[in-house]
Image: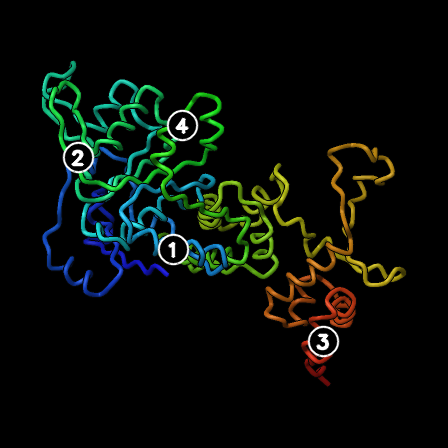
Amino acid sequence: MVKVVTIRKSPSWPGDFEDRRGYTSLERFMEASQAPQQSSPFARQGRAVGRAEKRWPRLEGSSESVRRLEDNIARVATFDCSVLITGETGCGKEEVARAIHAAGPRHDKPFVAINCGGLVADLAESQLFGHEKGAFTGAFGATRGAFRAAEGGIIFLDEIGELPLDLQPKLLRVLQRWEVTPVGSTGTHAIDVQVIAATNRDLEANVTSGMFREDLLYRLNTIHLNVPPLRSRAEDIPRFVEHFSAHFAREYGRPQWQPDPLTLNRFMRHSWPGNVRQLAQTVQRVYVFEDRVDVVLAEVFDAAAAPAARPLPTSSEISVAPAAGPVVGQELDDDVGSMDSVASDDPKVPVFNLDELRRLAVRQALAFTHGHRGQAATLLGVSLNTMTRLVADSCPDVLAKSGRRRTPTAPRPR
């Protein structure tokens, strides 16, 4: 488990990355608080991160995939080797890199983040390796470049898959020789940095298509860490919602938004193609348009073109067919028409297994309510008696563990 303590000098976070250093122990915290702050002229040239509250929480969640990732971070942080972090956009790849920096021996040295996709074509080499005075038009002074600015620390090459092809052999040489040659110079400068790269692309496919050098991929991919997408760890979503809701409540001076169980369930079932970043922006819009929260959420959930990663019916779509027993199905709107009109060989028509949907719905409701059948029944939109039958039919193991005890109901008022 990587525990990161973040230090700030003021309520509004400065742009220098040195003020965002993380520490894994109280001793490091005390040493840092007494030591003078370092500065780097390249910090302001790199990607601006913004205020601390704008950044995503580090490795938020308690799912098995997150715990496994935290364990790998703790292992990797003790070794000085190149690391390649992969994962979808917005899933927190930079936070993993910062956690490695905070937990490793380079924690008190610079962390320089470079967006390879944002490098200016004509100045990319200079931005990475520096240049001498007069090296090109407008070069009125010498610059160190990102690699030398990260001396002793970590350079984070984000979106490495978008690095221009003509720069890739130069980066490869740096990783082979650990020295850089500034633009316009005939000399070299030895460097001591750890390289962490990240991408949301399939670099092996890029190698096949000739868009990425295979030898460079081997150099970067000493250790490979994959950040799981948010949809694969839906159990962590309530913690993210609570985190961002508390943050925006403080930032905007509003009461904290507390989503009801049905709304939170919709958050958990959504696919979140933009991952944590998209979820944070959704919660932010709830505060901006607090008088029409339903409209804001409908734009996200109802208008989503992509299929949900957890294809479970919503509570309003769950019903029990009395004639056929406790079968959970999906009610179709009147304007949709009968499924008989849909061709069975249409590839767009999904194949549903009602028994599996029923089991998933019941188990998810029980897990979400920590086994409370009454609350689970409310979540599914059924009565307590119906919920008991559903548990008996769909989850007999759950009923056996509970000794077939029924959840007591509150006495009716006289």
Q: Position of residue 97 (x, y in %)?
A: 33, 46
Q: Which mark is residue 148?
A: 2
Location of the N terminus by quadrant is bottom left
Residue at mark 3 to residue at mark 1: CA–CA distance: 42 Å
Q: What residue is drawn where x is 18% and y is 40%?
A: 192
Residue at mark 3 to residue at mark 4: CA–CA distance: 55 Å
Q: Which mark is residue 214?
A: 4
Q: Is residue 144 above or below residue 29?
A: above
Question: For numbered disc 1, what is the local secondary structure?
Answer: helix
Question: For numbered disc 4, what is the local secondary structure?
Answer: helix
First-in-chain label (4 vs 1) = 4
In the rendered structure, the answer to whether residue 352 lies left or right of residue 31 reads right
Q: Which amino acid does label 2 sit on?
A: Arg
Quarter of image, res 132:
top left
Question: For numbered disc 3, what is the local secondary structure?
Answer: helix
Q: Which amino acid does label 3 sit on?
A: Ala
Q: Position of residue 24 (x, y in %)?
A: 27, 60
Residue at mark 2 to residue at mark 3: CA–CA distance: 64 Å
> Which circle, 3 or 1, is nearer the viewer?
3
Q: Which amino acid does label 1 sit on?
A: His
Q: In this view, does 131 lie above or below 306?
A: above
> Which circle, 2 or 4, is nearer the viewer?
4
First-in-chain label (1 vs 2) = 2
Residue at mark 4 to residue at mark 1: CA–CA distance: 43 Å
**Count of marks, rendered view:** 4
- Pointer 2 local density, CA inside 10 Å: few below 14, some 14–19, many at least 20: many
> Which circle, 4 or 1, is nearer the viewer?
4
